[in-house]
Image: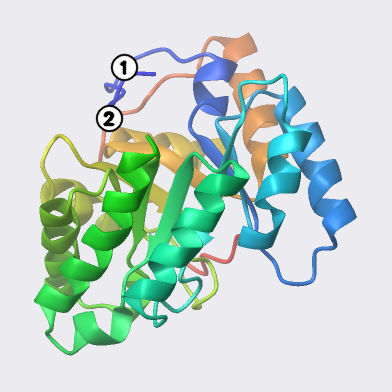
Amino acid sequence: MPQTLAPGQTLTVQDVADLIDHALLKPELTPAEVERACRELAEQEIWSVCVRPSDVAMARAAVEGHSTRVCTVIGFPHGTTTTSTKVAEAKQALADGATELDMVLNIGCLRGGDADLVREDIAAVVEVGHAAGALVKVIFETALLDDAQKVAACRASQEAGADFVKTSTGFAGGGATLPDVRLMRASTGPDVQVKASGGVRDIDTLLAMVAEGVTRIGTSSTEALLAGAREREAAGTLVVPEPGADVTDPDGQDY
């Protein structure tokens, strides 16, 4: 899939599937529920399943034979574990078969103005991830940050070599908004992609996010998104709109 999808571009259902990291992160999910979901999602050839660290090895086996990848979270959901702990988590996840790591930056240190610590924390995970050929995404928790802090998080992520900046965990009372993804896209260079997570439940919202430069969607609403994509494809209207719409569900609760 291209790094960006241009306004006016016609998509396929597979293009939409290639945007999706399906979240299986709720603490109450049983291993059997996660395994079953991974198998069903892999049949739809979505980009990845994003599972809890303890589920990585099982998820890797469940998606075997399909293009669907295994993503997991690091320092989740608060970002307050030590750098050495995040590195250890990353190494274990990679050994278990993860190929993408979504790490939570140290939110408190960012809000406290310690950009150096935040950057070094990210860089340590990036080093481990990239050595194994894995992508690293940095979760900001935008609902807890002001715009200046979001820009600082973008700068720290880019300087640390991260592959993506990501809006939210889905567990802090807010999710992706169009103003936030616009700001994140404007505050990072072309080598850093933007992932919108939380609140993307319908195809209109997904397409509006894509129009703003988002190239990955974190969601637990995959079934609804793909159903909407199929309807639009059949009607010949699965097209990236012009940027500027605001259709995001304000509560952002999607995980």
- Which residue is at the far bottom? 112
Give x and y (percent) for residue 179: 26, 57
Q: Residue at 21% of width from left, 80% of height from top?
A: 110
Q: Is residue 140 above or below residue 248?
A: below
Query: For the residue carrying disc 1, how many other residues have a C-alpha within 10 Å: few (<14), some (14-19), or many (20+)?
Result: few
Dot 2 falls on a residue whose secondary structure is loop
Q: Which residue was labeled with disc 1?
A: 8
Q: Label 1 near label 2: C-beta < 8 Å?
A: yes
Identify the secondary structure beneath mark 1.
loop
Q: Position of residue 70 (x, y in %)?
A: 59, 40
**Amino acid at the residue labelled 1:** Gly
| Left or right: where 148 falls relative to 201 | left
Quadrant location of residue 125? bottom left
Disc 2 residue type?
Answer: Glu
Render colour scheme? rainbow
Residue located at (51% from left, 47% from top): 94
Name which of mark 2 and mark 1 comes first in the sequence: 1
Provide residue 242's location: percent of width, then percent of height: 27, 30
Q: Is residue 135 left or right of residue 149?
A: right
**In the image, what residue occupies the spot 57% across and 27% down?**
17
In this rendered view, identify the residue nearer to me: 235 or 168: 168
Q: Quadrant of residue 3?
A: top left
Left or right of 180 in this view: 25: right
